[in-house]
């Protein structure tokens, strides 16, 4: 049983508006690799060769192979107790927004409804030029990715380095952060902006800021309450303390 502070439990029990930001750490217990740290993807692969528009234009086949490989891995994983706890949390609050940097679709699979995907979703494709969704198969045998009706190349619908995030999603996320009485930052290194600014915005506008992470991050000094440990263990404990 994890000890939770009385002040946090009081705020948790009475909050009207709650927002949560999640990162790769939340899906780590499902077997999805994180990005940073010794076992993270960016310690083994070079982001600039795989996750930029330039990389895609230079070598679309390589970039597609990497994304199809990750898509296949993500098709095999299932939500963990942390994802389910957040889906459960949503039911208790009048105003609840789940903001995720993850592209793995596990929040939706766990039943979360009011979800903002900041960095896209790895299971979707879109046109590089016009942005139209593409639902056909990705066949790389010819060495070239499929083309959109407009002639543009089809790419994964994720945000790459150097790209802007979907404008409406970011706006809604900052609005939710600004409204929140209580904001949770879970399993993120708090290094990538604009996501990393959301908990700070919430806190500046008066929200009680809770961070859940295996280790301290640049956000920790701003958090009102820092819980060190696994999100798949801490979040279910938090849910158990909600008033019935
Ligand atoms: P990171 O890999 O940067 O950070 C993962 C964080 O999760 C670290 O701070 C870990 O300590 C923590 N962590 C790991 N396992 C955990 C667990 N079981 N419980 C709690 N915390 C745990 O991942 P993100 O912060 O999500 O962007 O990275 C942000 C963005 O950088 C990603 O969305 C991606 C990447 O480049 C794009 O692809 C655009």
Image: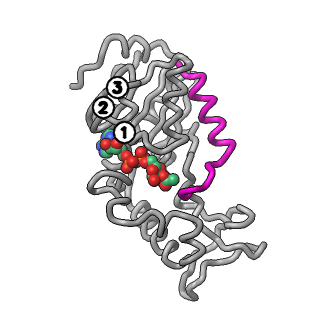
Question: Is residue 161 shown in magenta?
Answer: yes
Question: Please, which residue is most extreme toward the left here?
Answer: 1
Q: Which mark is residue 82?
A: 1
Q: Position of residue 159 (x, y in %)?
A: 57, 56
The boundaries of the magenta stretch are 160-181
Disc 3 beta carbon < 8 A from ligand 1? no
Mark 3 lies on a secondary structure that is helix
- Can you tell which quarter of the image residue 189 is in? top left
Q: Work out how far the residue at label 1 is from the one at label 2, CA to CA, in angstroms.
A: 8 Å
Question: Is residue 22 shown in magenta?
Answer: no
Q: Which mark is residue 97?
A: none
Q: Work out how far the residue at label 1 is from the one at label 3, CA to CA, in angstroms.
A: 10 Å
Mark 1 lies on a secondary structure that is helix
Q: Is residue 103 visible?
A: no
- Can you tell which quarter of the image residue 97 is in? top right
Tag 3 residue: 238
Q: Position of residue 212 (x, y in %)?
A: 35, 32
Q: Are marks 1 and 2 in contact (CB under 8 Å)?
A: yes
**Closer to us: 98 or 44:** 44
Disc 1 beta carbon < 8 A from ligand 1? yes
**Residue found 40% across the figure and 41% down from its top:** 188
Q: Position of residue 11 (x, y in %)?
A: 43, 13
Q: Is residue 115 visible?
A: yes
Tag 2 residue: 234
Q: Are marks 3 and 2 in contact (CB under 8 Å)?
A: yes
Disc 2 beta carbon < 8 A from ligand 1? yes
Residues packed near mark 2 inside 10 Å, few (<14), some (14 to 19) or many (20 plus): many
**Residue found 52% across the figure and 29% down from its top:** 19
**Residue found 26% across the figure and 55% down from its top:** 38
Quadrant where the image shows the C terminus: top left
Mark 2 lies on a secondary structure that is helix
């Amino acid at each position: 049983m994890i000890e939770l502070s009385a002040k946090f439990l009081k705020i948790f029990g009475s909050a009207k508006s709650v927002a949560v930001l999640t990162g790769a750490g939340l899906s780590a217990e499902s077997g999805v690799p994180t990005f940073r740290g010794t076992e993270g993807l960016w310690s083994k692969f070079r982001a600039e060769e795989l996750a930029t528009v330039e990389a895609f234009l230079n070598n679309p086949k390589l970039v597609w192979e990497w994304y199809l490989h990750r898509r296949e891995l993500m098709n095999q994983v299932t939500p963990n107790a942390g994802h389910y706890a957040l889906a459960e949390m949503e039911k208790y609050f009048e105003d609840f927004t789940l903001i995720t940097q993850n592209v793995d679709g596990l929040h939706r699979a766990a039943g979360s409804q009011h979800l903002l995907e900041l960095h896209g979703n790895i299971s979707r494709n879109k046109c590089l030029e016009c942005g139209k969704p593409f639902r056909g198969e990705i066949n790389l045998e010819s060495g070239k990715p499929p083309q959109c009706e407009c002639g543009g190349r089809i790419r994964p619908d994720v945000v790459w380095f150097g790209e802007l995030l979907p404008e409406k999603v970011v706006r809604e996320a900052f609005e939710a952060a600004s409204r929140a009485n209580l904001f949770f930052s879970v399993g993120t290194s708090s290094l990538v902006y604009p996501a990393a600014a959301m908990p700070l915005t919430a806190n500046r506008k008066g929200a009680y800021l809770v961070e859940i992470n295996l280790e301290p991050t640049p956000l920790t000094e701003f958090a009102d309450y820092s819980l060190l440990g696994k999100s798949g263990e801490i979040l279910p404990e938090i849910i158990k303390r909600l008033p019935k």
